[in-house]
Each structure stands twice: as structure tokens, then as C-alpha cells.
């Protein structure tokens, strides 16, 4: 049996299977989207992209994702700081709750936001009286994006804060620096790599988010129609080439971000 | 100052996580316990939960098997050139950057009824898109990096010395794997399995596009929640979503537990 298993043919068959699986499952589909969006020629691609509904959805997604990322970087840095530096009741619980948005299905996240802020709810009713509109408008999309990307910044900043040598801070204090200056010149620089890489991960995830957003977004072109929902709509209305064109833009953006994150991490490791 | 930050942190958690969860739970039980059961015991809900279960089992098995193998190759294989290994290594992460909807679209474009491959499969009588195989492929695509990325760092850390020693002493490939490699990667694999289960349980965008969301046929729990919301049946949606949330919370606890074990070995 063993001599049979050790035969060269088996080894090669095995290796080929694994690599083939990899290429067929990951590489082929990605190339397929690029191929399809250009399959009817470059002009068709430009035509699909220059449809105002299409490019406005991309711009809107970028804008909302930027807002969500900025909020997330601020909140995430604060929470990481509190969870590492302070001791208070419930700390362990909060620390495990951080990962909940990752574990929850995104559609469930969307439903939760819809129920909490929707027209029939307490907050939704109050906002409506004050003249705000949340659900099916831009604020709800941003909230959904913040919800699903919540853990990224926290989990990127926490290890950096843990590693930070307290003696550096103490030295700064002994030399007479005020706490605001210590924060600016000692603590913030050491947190910055985590804030940036966590923020970028959150940004790329917010760009791609579909499940949570589709339940709370309206479908008004240019105002509440984000690209992932637009792509879904195009697929549903049997226009895969239009869907592929917008997908190519989003994909290229996400790949660029991923590449940048990798580059940053390599730099960080070297220095 | 200190108190203020702690209060703010609590506030964020309450507003962003606790309040939505609580609201969803009360909504699911808004017609009492019987209403909750009624929303779950609808035939389409039972079928959707079963479908999700099937997808989770098949995807977790395949992803675990191929994930471990690929991690082994990417770390250990000398027959792969260094350049090629680097390239493959960076490709592993690509599914992270792909929006789930686009992941679904890719599979429709590649294997859908209009494509060459899809037509071929149709001729031999196998439907892929709008059927179970397509849903599995879509979920496999989305969960692909999870196992590889858990196992690879452990393999790098333990180094190949022990394995080499085992094979010099005459152990065959399988024996080396089971006796030497497996004990050290075990907890990383378990962690990867939990991550894969959680992700495939909750996958929505890719499955929605590929499955066509056909009730009692290809509908999963998450796509049922979506359909219920579209039909303004939020109470029923809340019931199914609560079950999903309970599963995810359980998986989260398992994750914490295995993370601790992983650190200890």
C-alpha cells in the first residue's frame, strides 16, 4: 500500500489537483469578470461605465465609505485605547463583543439596523419628527458600513498599544512634557500604522459591503444606490456586461488597496 | 478624563451592538413565543435552514482539506519556485478584496447558462448556477483564504526540522504529517474551521446572486431573511435572523476558546 502511495504519479496528480483547484476557484473567476466586461469591446465598457447611474453609484460608494472609515478610525482608536489602558467592570465582555460584527451574517446586521432605526421604531419615529431621514437614506448606509467594519481598526491598533513600552511615555513625562504632547509625539505615532492599515481594511470592506447595505439602502440613483446594490440590480435585470463593468472598477480599487496594505506591512516589518 | 472615555466606549457598544441586537430579539418575539415558532416552522424557513446546513458542511469539509494542503505547499514545497510561491501567496488574499456580489457575478459569468462551460454542464444534465453546486462554489470562493491564512503562520513558525528528522528516520509522508505536523497545526485548523463555518453560515451576497433565491429550492437562511424583509414581513425575518445570530454568537464563544488554546498549544 505504501509503495503504491509513494509512487511518483500519485504525488504529481495530487500536486496538480491542489494547484488546479486554486487556479480554477480563485484566478479563473476574477479573470472572467475582466474578460466579460471587455468582451464586447472597449467602447461598450466605456458606455457601461459612463452611464450616469453607474458612475454616480461608484462615487456615492466612495464618499460614504470614506465617511464610515473616518468615523471608524476615530471610534476604533478610542475603543482600542480604553480596552488596553483602563481596567473597568465589563472589559472582557466588551473585548469579545468587538468581533461580533464579523461573526454575524451581514444580512442579520442590516436587519438589526433596519429594525432599530426603521420607520416604525422609536428612534426612527423621533428622527422623522425632527425632519431627518435615516433608513433608506445615506445615514443608514453609513451606519451599516460602520457596523460591519467595526472590528478592523480596534484589532489593528490593540497589539501596537500593547507593545508600546511604558518607559517611553514615562521618559517623556519626566522630561516635562504635558500629557497632550506625549499623546501627540509618543502615543499617536506608535498607533498610526494600525490606524492606517485598519482604516484601509475597513475602507475596502465598506466599498464591497452588500448584505447589510442592501436592506437599509434605498434605490434612488445617485443618492442612495451604492455600487454593490447597483451590480446586484444589473444581474437581476439580466445585464451582466453592465454589472461586470462596474465590478471591474470596484475590483481594481480593492486590489489596489490590498496591495497598498501589503506594501505598508512589508515596510513596517523591515524598519 | 478616564471616566469619560470609558463611558463613551460603553455608549458606542450599546448603540452599535447591544441596542440593535435587543431590538431584533424583541421584534422576533413581538407575537410571543408562538409567533417566533411560527416564523421558524414555516416550510420555507425549515428548508432554508436545512440548505444553509448543507452548504456549511460541504464547504467546511472541502475548504479545510484544500486549505491545509495548500498551506503546506505554500510553506514547504521546494518544487514550486520562490517567485511562483510569492505570486500564489498574494493571490490567496484576493477573495478578501472581492465584494460578495461580485464573487457571485463571477460564477454566473463563468458557469451560467449563457457561458460555454455552463452550456457544457447543462448538456450532461448538471445545473450549477441557480442550484446547489453553484452555491457551494460561491461560498468556497468567499471562505477560501480563512484556512490557508490560519495554518500558514504556524507552519512557518515550527519550521521543517522536525519533519525532516522524521523522514530521515524513515517515516513515510503520511506518518510524518500525522505524527509530527498535525499535532502542531491542530488548533490553528480548528480555529480555521470555526471561521469557515461562521463565514459560510452568514454568506449572503454571493449566494444570493448565484442561487437565484428560489423558495424551497435554493433559498438559504440569510437569503430568506432578505426576502422576508422585501415582503415587509419583518417579524418572520427577525425570527430567522435571531437563530442565525444565536449560532454566530456560539461560534464567537468557540473562537475565543480556541484562540486561548491556540496560544497555549
Image (cartoon, rainbow, N blue to C red):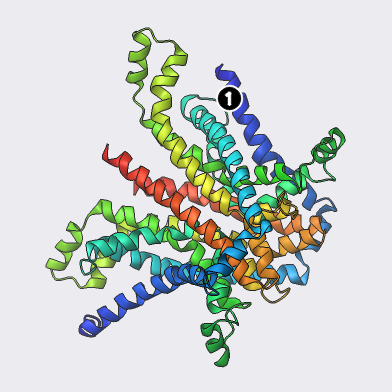
Residue that sits furthest to the front in the current view: A43
Residue carrying label 1: B6
How crowded pointer 1 is (Cα within 10 Å; few <14, some 14-19, many 20+) is rated as: some
In the image, taking residue A149 as reference, residue A53 lies left or right, namely right
The residue sitting at the left extreme is B168
Q: Residue at x 57, y 63 (%)?
A: A46
Up the image or down, B223 lies above or below A170; here it is below
Q: Tag count in the figure?
A: 1
Q: Inspect this view and state whether residue B168 appears.
A: yes
Q: Quadrant of residue B115?
A: bottom right
Residue A78 lies left or right of residue B183; in this view the side is: right
Corner quadrant of residue B67? bottom left
Image coordinates of residue B102 in percent, x first then y, are 56, 63
Above or below, comparing residue A86 to residue A261 in the picture: above
Residue located at (80% from left, 37% from top): A132
The answer to whether residue B104 of the structure is visible from this angle is: no
> Vertical placement of A189 versus A129: above or below?
above
- Residue A149 % position (x, y): 56, 45
Looking at the image, which residue is at 54% across and 79% down?
Answer: B111
| Residue A75 position by quadrant | top right
Q: Chain of mark 1?
A: B
**SS category of the residue bearing label 1:** helix
The location of residue A60, given as percent across then percent down, is: 64, 48
Left or right of B235? Residue B244 is: left
- Look at the image and tell me in which quarter the N terminus of chain A lies: bottom left
Q: Residue at x 69, y 64 (%)?
A: A233
Residue B95 at x, y percent in the picture: 47, 60
Amino acid at each position: 500500500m505504501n509503495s503504491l502511495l509513494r509512487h511518483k504519479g500519485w504525488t504529481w496528480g495530487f500536486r496538480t489537483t491542489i494547484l488546479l483547484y486554486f487556479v480554477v476557484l480563485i484566478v479563473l473567476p476574477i479573470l472572467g469578470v475582466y474578460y466579460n466586461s471587455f468582451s464586447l469591446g472597449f467602447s461598450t465598457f466605456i458606455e457601461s461605465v459612463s452611464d450616469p447611474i453607474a458612475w454616480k453609484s461608484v462615487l456615492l460608494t466612495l464618499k460614504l465609505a470614506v465617511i464610515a472609515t473616518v468615523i471608524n478610525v476615530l471610534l476604533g482608536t478610542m475603543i482600542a485605547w480604553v480596552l488596553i489602558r483602563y481596567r473597568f467592570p465589563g472589559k472582557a465582555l466588551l473585548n469579545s463583543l468587538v468581533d461580533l460584527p464579523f461573526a454575524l451574517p451581514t444580512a442579520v446586521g442590516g436587519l438589526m439596523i433596519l429594525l432599530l432605526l426603521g420607520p416604525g421604531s422609536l428612534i426612527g419615529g423621533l428622527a422623522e419628527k425632527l425632519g431627518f431621514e435615516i433608513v433608506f437614506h445615506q445615514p443608514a448606509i453609513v451606519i451599516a458600513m460602520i457596523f460591519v467594519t467595526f472590528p478592523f481598526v480596534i484589532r489593528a491598533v490593540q497589539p501596537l498599544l500593547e507593545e508600546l513600552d511604558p518607559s517611553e511615555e514615562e521618559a517623556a513625562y519626566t522630561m516635562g512634557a504635558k500629557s497632550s504632547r506625549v499623546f501627540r509625539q509618543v502615543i499617536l505615532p506608535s498607533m498610526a500604522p494600525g490606524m492606517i492599515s485598519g482604516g484601509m481594511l475597513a475602507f475596502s470592506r465598506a466599498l464591497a459591503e452588500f448584505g447589510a447595505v442592501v436592506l437599509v439602502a434605498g434605490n434612488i440613483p445617485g443618492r442612495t444606490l451604492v455600487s454593490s446594490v447597483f451590480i446586484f440590480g444589473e444581474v437581476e435585470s439580466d445585464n451582466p456586461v453592465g454589472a461586470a463593468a462596474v465590478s471591474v472598477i470596484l475590483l481594481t480599487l480593492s486590489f489596489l488597496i490590498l496591495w497598498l496594505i501589503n506594501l505598508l506591512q512589508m515596510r513596517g516589518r523591515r524598519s | 478624563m478616564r471616566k469619560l472615555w470609558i463611558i463613551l466606549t460603553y455608549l458606542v457598544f450599546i448603540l452599535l451592538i447591544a441596542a440593535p441586537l435587543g431590538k431584533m430579539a424583541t421584534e422576533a418575539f413581538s407575537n410571543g413565543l408562538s409567533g417566533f415558532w411560527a416564523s421558524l416552522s414555516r416550510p420555507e424557513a425549515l428548508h432554508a435552514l436545512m440548505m444553509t446546513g448543507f452548504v456549511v458542511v460541504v464547504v467546511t469539509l472541502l475548504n479545510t482539506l484544500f486549505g491545509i494542503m495548500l498551506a503546506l505547499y505554500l510553506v514547504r514545497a521546494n518544487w514550486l519556485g520562490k517567485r511562483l510561491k510569492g505570486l500564489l501567496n498574494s493571490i490567496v488574499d484576493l477573495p478578501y478584496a472581492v465584494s460578495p456580489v461580485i464573487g457571485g457575478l463571477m460564477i454566473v459569468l463563468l458557469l451560467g447558462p449563457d457561458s460555454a462551460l455552463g452550456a457544457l454542464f447543462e448538456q450532461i444534465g448538471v445545473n450549477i448556477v441557480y442550484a446547489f453546486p453553484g452555491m457551494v462554489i460561491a461560498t468556497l470562493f468567499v471562505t477560501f483564504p480563512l484556512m490557508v491564512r490560519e495554518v500558514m503562520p504556524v507552519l512557518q513558525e515550527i519550521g521543517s526540522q522536525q519533519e525532516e528528522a522524521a523522514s530521515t528516520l524513515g517515516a513515510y509522508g503520511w506518518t510524518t504529517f500525522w505524527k509530527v505536523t498535525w499535532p502542531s497545526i491542530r488548533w490553528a485548523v480548528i480555529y480555521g474551521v470555526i471561521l469557515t463555518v461562521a463565514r459560510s453560515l452568514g454568506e449572503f451576497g454571493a449566494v444570493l446572486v448565484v442561487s437565484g433565491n428560489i423558495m424551497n429550492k435554493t433559498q438559504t437562511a440569510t437569503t430568506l431573511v432578505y426576502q422576508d424583509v422585501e415582503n415587509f414581513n419583518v417579524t418572520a425575518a427577525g425570527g430567522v435572523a435571531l437563530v442565525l445570530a444565536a449560532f454566530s454568537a456560539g461560534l464567537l464563544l468557540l473562537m475565543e476558546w480556541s484562540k486561548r488554546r491556540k496560544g497555549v498549544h
